[in-house]
């Protein structure tokens, strides 16, 4: 009988220890979830700093966050992993299939970091992202492109994109390369309300001209200024030199 009692006490002790271990694991998991929520949902600076501390524990927590149900947390984890830790192209590329546009944009930005370090697979993945159905992802891919001859052709193709923001990004990138093919697209974007001011800013930097578009306050006045831009391009587009600095 005493032997039976000792065995029973032993089993109870083991069960209690197991329950404590489970409770501790749950507590750690929840504390990790809370840290991610504070960092990416509440924008807590201390929580963000803790995730950027370079420790193995923080990296593991961020990698777990890539599978979180909240898109903002997934996107935030991608950006911090790409910036402060090593995140391979193999880990990033599957995220281009995420349901969330924000996550796919973050994945493209992370690929840009990898491509800047000479990862050819990352560069190829960026080019594939240019076919994404979401304009925000296509625009992010254009910004992430490494500038070379083949990239120039991709940018020229993107000038015909159905989305004004994508056309703006492509035209600006070409202008920064010293390629004038983006100028007429920028002129036409002056009538696109969502990107008109940004298009004008690029035009002004590249040409030094305004045609008083920025001074006009009515739709009719800006349309007239846009016509002046068009006439200037037809007459002088072949001869003028871009200001790329």
Image (cartoon, rainbow, N blue to C red):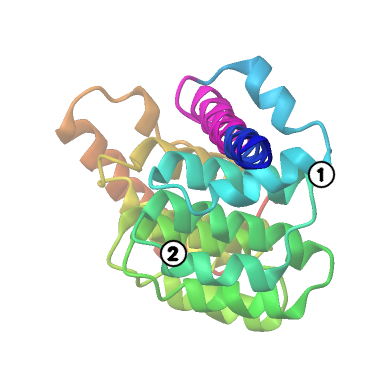
Residue at the image position 39 percent from the left and 35 percent from the top: 197
Query: Which quadrant is the C terminus positioned in?
Result: top right
Disc assigned to residue 138: 2
| Residue picked out by circle 1 | 56
**Which of the 4 image quadrants contains residue 121?**
bottom right
Q: Is 36 within the magenta?
A: yes
Q: Nearer the viewer, residue 58 or 206?
A: 58
Residue at the image position 56 percent from the left and 58 percent from the top: 107
The location of residue 134, given as percent across then percent down, is: 33, 62
Is residue 53 in sight in this rendering? yes
Is residue 233 in sight in this rendering? no
Please tell me whether the stretch drawn in magenta is mainly helix, strand or loop. helix
Q: Is 233 within the magenta?
A: no
Residue at the image position 59 percent from the left and 76 percent from the top: 125
Disc 2 or disc 1, which is closer to the eye? 1
The location of residue 47, given as percent across then percent down, is: 64, 21
Residue at the image position 43 percent from the left and 71 percent from the top: 158
Left or right? Give the position of 94 relative to 18: left
How many discs appear? 2
Q: Residues within 10 Å of mark 1 (few under 14, many from 20)?
A: few
* Secondary structure found at label 1: helix
Q: Nearer the viewer, residue 202 or 222?
A: 202
Query: Which quadrant is the N terminus positioned in?
Result: top right
The mark nearer the N terminus, 2 or 1, is: 1
The location of residue 126, given as percent across then percent down, is: 58, 71
Q: Nearer the viewer, residue 34 or 168?
A: 34
Give, as a single range, the part of the protein colored magenta: 19-42
């Amino acid at each position: 009988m005493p032997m039976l009692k000792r065995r029973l006490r032993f089993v109870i002790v083991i069960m209690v220890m197991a329950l404590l271990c489970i409770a501790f694991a749950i507590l750690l998991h929840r504390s990790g979830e809370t840290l991610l929520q504070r960092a990416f949902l509440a924008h807590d600076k201390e929580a963000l700093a803790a995730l950027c501390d370079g420790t193995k524990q923080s990296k593991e927590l961020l990698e777990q966050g890539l599978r979180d149900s909240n898109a903002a947390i997934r996107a935030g984890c991608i950006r911090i992993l790409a910036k402060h830790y090593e995140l391979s192209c193999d880990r990033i590329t599957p995220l281009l299939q995420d349901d969330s546009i924000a996550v796919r944009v973050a994945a493209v930005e992370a690929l840009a970091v990898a491509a800047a370090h000479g990862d050819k697979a990352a560069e190829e993945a960026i080019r594939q992202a240019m076919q994404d159905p979401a304009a925000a992802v296509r625009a992010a891919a254009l910004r992430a492109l490494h500038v070379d001859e083949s990239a120039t052709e991709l940018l020229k193709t993107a000038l015909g994109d159905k989305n004004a923001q994508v056309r703006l990004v492509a035209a600006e990138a070409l202008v920064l390369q010293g390629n004038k093919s983006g100028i007429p697209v920028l002129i036409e974007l002056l009538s696109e309300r969502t990107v008109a001011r940004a298009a004008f800013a690029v035009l002004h930097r590249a040409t030094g001209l305004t045609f008083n578009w920025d001074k006009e306050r009515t739709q009719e006045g800006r349309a007239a200024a846009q016509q002046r831009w068009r006439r200037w391009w037809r007459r002088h587009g072949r001869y003028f030199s871009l200001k790329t600095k």
